[in-house]
Amino acid sequence: MPAPEFLSENERPSDHFESESNQDLWSIFKIMGEFVDGYDKLLRIGPCISVFGSARLKPGSRYYDMAIKTAEMITENGFGVITGGGPGIMEAGNRGAHNKGGKSVGLGIELPFEQGTNEFVHPKYEINFKYFFVRKVMFVKYAQGFIVFPGGFGTLDELFETLTLIQTNKIKRIPIVMVGTDYWSGLVGWIKTQLIENGLISPEDAELFFLTDDHEEAVRHVCEFYRKQKPEPNFSY
């Protein structure tokens, strides 16, 4: 019996992929340029904590205000603050670093619905990217910890990629704090009841992150981690 056909001959994949090969090869140089620029600038900044969260949370909201206080405490403890440079939680993180005269880093991304970095990113520490994957490497390589506020797909992507890199020993363990038990508890419960109970991850993998509602406790967790070891760039081996 012949296999059913879902595409006509004109709709089926063609050899047009070959005509795109030169364009793909040239894009490698653009990608390399973004890596070189990012590595060069971020290496000079020193130890930083990445602050993630939704771009849609407004000034005056609970988590926006908490992110400002968190970033202020991060700065007071000698770390710089890295964000995606946009609005919402990213703006709050940069604002907190700016308030305390700390290093306020913005790793921007070219998007059709976002224009430029927020006003609290220091011009010296502003880097803009075209490629999401290059930007994510910079977040992880030069961050000594992650404090993650409620967010959408982008926040979840960055959180789970970092957890995966630690789980698979691609980077050394760094502190990951999730702020907001009312937001994260459903996800944490699913991780325990579905992933752990079904043997899809190890029980100790649930210890790779720390959940809290207290911004002081979040920063304390990061600082306690570095009482025992020296901060250094990731992907260093």
Image (cartoon, helix red, strand yellow):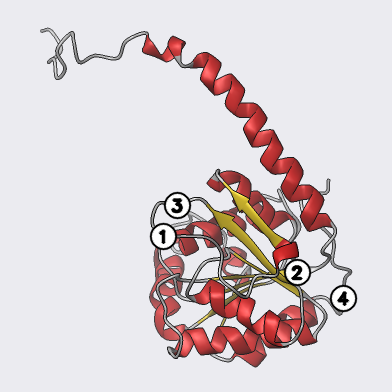
- SS for callout 1: helix
For residue 230, which quarter of the picture? bottom right
Alpha carbon of mark 4 to alpha carbon of mark 3: how far? 40 Å
Sequence order check, earlier mark of 2 and 1: 2
Name the front one of labels 2 and 3. 3
Res. 64 mark: none
Res. 153 mark: 1
- SS for callout 4: loop
Q: Nearer the viewer, residue 119 or 8?
A: 119
Percent position of residue 4, x then y = 12, 15
Q: Amino acid at mark 2?
A: Cys
In the rendered view, does 60 fall on the left or right side of 206? left
Q: Amino acid at mark 4?
A: Lys
Which residue corresponds to mark 2?
48
Name the front one of labels 2 and 4. 2
Sequence order check, earlier mark of 1 and 4: 1
Q: Amino acid at mark 3?
A: Leu
For residue 148, which quarter of the picture? bottom right
Which residue corresponds to mark 3?
111
Q: Amino acid at mark 1?
A: Phe
Q: Is residue 124 above or below residue 99?
A: above
